[in-house]
Image (tube, rainbow, N blue to C red):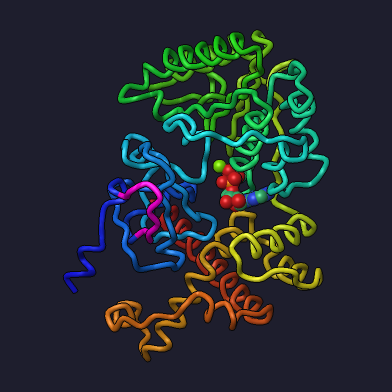
Amino acid sequence: MLDNFKRIKKISDMAEGEKAYIQLGGLVSDEHGRLWLNLEGKVSTKGGSVITPVIKRTGKRKYDFEIDNNNAYTPYSVESEILKNDSSCICLDDFFEVGLKADIEIKKAESIKEKLSPLYNIFLNDEILNQVLINTNIPEITRGEKPVFSGVILYGEGGTGKTSLQKAIGGVYKNCGAIAEELNVASMSEKFIGSLGNNLDKKIGEINKESEKRNVPAFIFLDEATSLVMSRETHNSSSADYYQEAVDVLKKYISNYPNLVFSITTNAMPDIYDDTLVREGRLLPVLIPLPGMVEKTKMWEFFLDKYEIIKNLDKSCYQKLAEISSEEKGSFISEFAKGYIPGKKLEEETRLSNTSSILDSLSKGVYASIEKVKEKINFDIIFADLEKAVSKGRKRNRLKNQIGFKRFEAV
Ligand SMILES: Nc1ncnc2c1ncn2[C@@H]1O[C@H](COP(=O)(O)OP(=O)(O)O)[C@@H](O)[C@H]1O
Ligand SMILES: [Mg+2]
């Protein structure tokens, strides 16, 4: 027993070249589903499941680690704002943040195909994707030319891939040697919303300087920044003037600085946007819709493979999955796939321990290996599980609507 304890150490204390398994708490996720490594977390010589993946220390520097995070999963979730401010946490899924915080070398993509690769995991109908790519100057960027358009406002319901699309475009910019930077409205407002305009001005100014110095375009993107696209009339809170200041800062830069390309996501419809932000030559609003059957079929194939559930099924199988999830968003498919193997593993362990309680099964120490769990999975099982998940989701939505309705009546 004592021996086991001795073999547990802090991730930051690992020696160069050492390989071990991350223990619970060493990985956390944020509200965007991104994984973060907590250097204060522990490693042990035991593990290897999706919740205790392998980590290797590749060098002496603080951030020199290699982790198989493709398959990793964590039950712990912490807000990204908190993680960003914690110097012992590194974002694994988003190299923009890693790039800012750490000096990890990002491998330079060689071929154009490689440069464009972040976009291959985005499933959108061609017409809409083309519109976004044209207006964010992807053709020019890949050829090393100057940007032509000022950028886009991606709008629509949540879970349709707006954030992912914006990030993927940023990825292409970086792969092509250009600048891509995400700006965060919440962190720029700090404790006082009045500082937003100033901070935004300073930040965009810095990026512009850098892009002029390096003579490369810069992609500046803001996620869920509805307050920055709204017109003065639609800002009805006491902070309206401060937001207006920030919108004015954006207006100052958009289309006046040839290197800068902007992208903003929002769930608000164009009728409340500030006119001067979207007028000719400025940002083009593009509706990102729910995926159609074609995109959904591709998504099932992609996400079942990505999370190593099953691959190379017949096309008709992916179509069947798309059909029963026809009313779901893209985020439903990715979440289903991400949690599938860990869920099946727990299911198997509770079954083996003859209990319906995860707590009981955990305390009995029953363990099912991922390989064994995967062996039992086939299309019919996935289909049945998906049917259950879809109907559970619908029930929940119905309930939500009912509760909302009653509350409304009571007032
Ligand atoms: N059209 C899509 N293409 C690829 N992935 C998608 C798509 N729609 C949703 N997803 C997946 O769903 C999750 C949530 O998507 P996200 O980009 O955050 O949506 P939004 O910003 O519109 O709310 C992501 O993990 C992403 O992989
Ligand atoms: Mg989003």
- Locate residue 35 relative to residue 291 in the image: left or right: left
- Locate residue 168 relative to residue 243 in the image: left or right: right
Residue toward you, 149 or 20 = 20
- Residue occupying image coordinates x 48% and y 59%: 72
Which residue ends up furthest to the left in the rendered image? 2
**Up-down: is 334 above or below 167?**
below
Question: At which x and y percent is residue 330?
Answer: 64, 54
- Find the magenta span and give its range: 14-22
- Residue occupying image coordinates x 36% and y 83%: 366
**Up-down: is 194 above or below 304?**
above
Magenta-span inclusion, residue 249? no
Question: At which x and y percent is residue 146?
Answer: 75, 16
Question: At which x and y percent is residue 145?
Answer: 77, 18
Quadrant, the N terminus: bottom left
Which residue ends up furthest to the bottom in the rendered image? 354
- Residue occupying image coordinates x 54% and y 29%: 222
Question: At which x and y percent is residue 385?
Answer: 59, 76
- Locate residue 53 relative to residue 379 in the image: left or right: left
Q: Quadrant of residue 153?
A: top right
| Residue 158 in sight here | no
**Up-down: is 309 above or below 53?**
below
| Residue 172 in sight here | yes
Residue toward you, 179 or 240 = 179
**Up-down: is 284 above or below 93?**
above
- Locate residue 7 relative to residue 202 in the image: left or right: left
Q: Quadrant of residue 219?
A: top right
